[in-house]
């Protein structure tokens, strides 16, 4: 959408204004564009779509099959499907041949990012270079006032909407002992753009236990003998924990499981969240094997200077400006022993954490909150006190929110939001997605016993 299109919208009330354009809100933009009864606008502060651009490494893959695209699981006939993207770019037969020699449907992340950008370029309801500054509620008119800044032109504009959909996701997180040197260290989210500078360091330490840390470590290990740096990887987990990708385990990302989750007491939900780490935060098994194989090949060519240590967490971290290096105190939690490492580069592959956007502060009283300033998310993805005006697409899972980051649920989630906004079902919403029960069939079991006499 052009800048002029946005300017002409002043005074007009949109049905939805989406804030932030990641895969979830981009999917909502694709699914709402053909609906004549909906007038939607999606705003993004960046100048173009880029999905985790800091980790778009050449070998990085999705952790979900390609059918988890922007639209297919809601509308397989949509023009915004991944398969249509392949057809329109003249690559569908090449992709067909690629799949014949592929054990799974986990595609390169770079390819999906290119697909996302292709879809964004075909939409007229998305606008880039628009940073949302405030969201206010007008009691008299019953609409939300969204003030955004054109980051290229410096102009501010107030847009009106009946509903808000938050899709800005989460922010890079670092361990608490590293907060004081946060501006000196590197998060994996920024790795790719700093990759060449990192390779010039004499020593590099990667901290983290998940997919991002594993991808960065694999990339650095690939070139360790070429650049000659010392490479450390420190993980808090007891081993490289594989992400559970078995089919019945993945049914814990379904709405069926969400219903079960919310039926439990809050203490039980807190226990479940802690137990879900391997489902949402593990490493692709194939990458774990690739790392081992690469390490073995390096050994055959003459050993390299590297260390991989588990069961270890950060205790303290300082930065010395004179040597431009870090001194990190680690603790091996099982042995209860501390040790120090000095490293020139420190890379945190420590995931992401929700932080309340400043632009929501004027309407914080209209939002349902739980502990630690987190959203209390209803089953229809709403977070407002009315349960029908402010929706969230992606926020961390906690005892009062079950929004799995699994891309396979984005179409279902967007279908639910569209149904809530329209007041009717536009895209069919499946009533049950799982092949298993999560709650006890007490009523059904009693009936079966009675019938059996």
Image (cartoon, grey):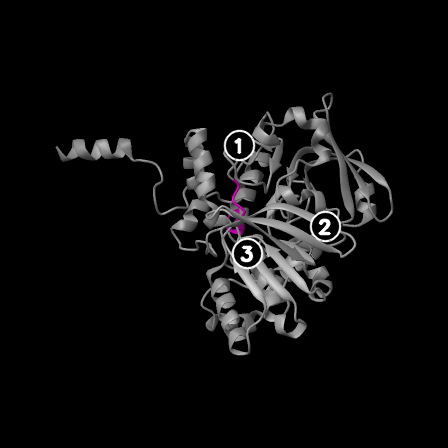
Is 282 one of the magenta-colored residues?
no
Choose mark 1 or mark 3, whichever is in front: 3
Is 406 one of the magenta-colored residues?
yes
Q: CA distance from mark 2 to mark 1?
A: 43 Å
Tell me which numbered mark, 3 or 2, is placed earlier along the sequence.
Answer: 3
Neighbours of disc 2 within 10 Å: few (<14), some (14-19), many (20+): many
At 57% from the left edge and 33% from the top edge, which residue is drawn? 382
Q: Is residue 59 visible?
A: no
Q: Quadrant of the C terminus?
A: top left
Viewer-proximal residue among 407 and 306? 306
At 14% from the left edge and 35% from the top edge, which residue is drawn? 452
Task: Point out the residue furthest to the top here.
Answer: 140
Q: Which mark is residue 211?
A: 3
The reply to whether callout 2 and callout 1 are in contact (CB within 8 Å) is no
Residue 370 location (% of width, % of height): 56, 28
Q: CA distance from mark 1 to mark 3?
A: 29 Å
Mark 2 — residue? 319
Tell me which numbered mark, 1 or 3, is placed earlier along the sequence.
Answer: 3
Q: CA distance from mark 3 to mark 2?
A: 26 Å
Q: Is residue 64 left or right of residue 87?
A: left
Viewer-proximal residue among 231 and 255? 231
Give the magenta-colored segment's residue range: 403-409
Residue 293 location (% of width, % of height): 49, 70
């Amino acid at each position: 959408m052009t800048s002029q299109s946005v300017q002409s919208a002043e005074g007009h009330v949109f049905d939805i204004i989406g804030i932030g354009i990641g895969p979830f809100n981009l999917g909502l933009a694709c699914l709402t564009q053909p609906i004549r009864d909906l007038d939607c606008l999606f705003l993004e502060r960046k100048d173009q779509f880029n999905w985790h651009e800091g980790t778009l490494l050449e070998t990085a893959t999705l952790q979900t099959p390609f059918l988890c695209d922007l639209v297919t699981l809601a509308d397989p006939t949509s023009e915004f499907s991944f398969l249509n993207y392949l057809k329109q770019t003249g690559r569908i037969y090449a992709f067909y041949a690629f799949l014949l020699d592929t054990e799974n449907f986990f595609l390169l992340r770079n390819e999906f990012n290119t697909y996302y950008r292709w879809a964004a370029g075909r939409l007229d309801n998305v606008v880039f270079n628009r940073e949302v500054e405030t969201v206010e509620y007008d009691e008299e008119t019953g609409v939300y006032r969204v003030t955004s800044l054109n980051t290229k032109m410096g102009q501010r504009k107030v847009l009106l909407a009946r509903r808000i959909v938050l899709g800005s996701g989460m922010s890079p997180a670092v361990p608490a002992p590293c907060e004081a040197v946060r501006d000196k260290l590197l998060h994996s989210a920024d790795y790719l753009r700093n990759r060449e500078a990192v390779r010039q360091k004499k020593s590099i330490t990667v901290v983290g236990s998940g997919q991002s840390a594993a991808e960065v470590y694999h990339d650095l290990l690939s070139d360790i003998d070429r650049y000659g740096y010392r490479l450390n990887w420190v993980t808090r987990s007891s081993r490289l924990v594989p992400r559970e990708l078995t089919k019945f385990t993945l049914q814990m990302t379904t709405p069926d499981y969400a219903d079960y989750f919310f039926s439990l007491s809050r203490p039980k939900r807190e226990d479940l969240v802690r137990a879900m780490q391997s489902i949402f935060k593990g490493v692709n098994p194939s990458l774990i094997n690739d790392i081992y194989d690469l390490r073995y090949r390096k050994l055959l060519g003459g050993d390299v200077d590297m260390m991989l240590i588990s069961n270890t967490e950060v205790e303290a971290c300082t930065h010395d400006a004179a040597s431009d290096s870090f001194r990190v105190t680690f603790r091996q939690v099982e042995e209860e022993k501390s040790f120090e490492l000095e490293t020139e580069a420190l890379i945190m592959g420590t995931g992401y954490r929700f932080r309340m956007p400043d632009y929501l502060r004027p309407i914080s009283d209209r939002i349902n909150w739980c502990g630690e300033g987190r959203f209390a998310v209803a089953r229809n993805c709403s977070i407002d006190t009315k349960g029908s005006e402010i929706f969230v697409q992606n926020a961390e899972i906690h005892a009062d929110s079950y929004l799995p980051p699994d891309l396979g649920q984005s179409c279902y989630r967007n279908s639910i939001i569209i149904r809530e906004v329209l007041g009717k079902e536009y895209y069919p919403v499946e009533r049950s997605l799982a092949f298993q029960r999560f709650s006890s069939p007490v009523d059904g079991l009693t009936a079966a016993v009675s019938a059996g006499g």
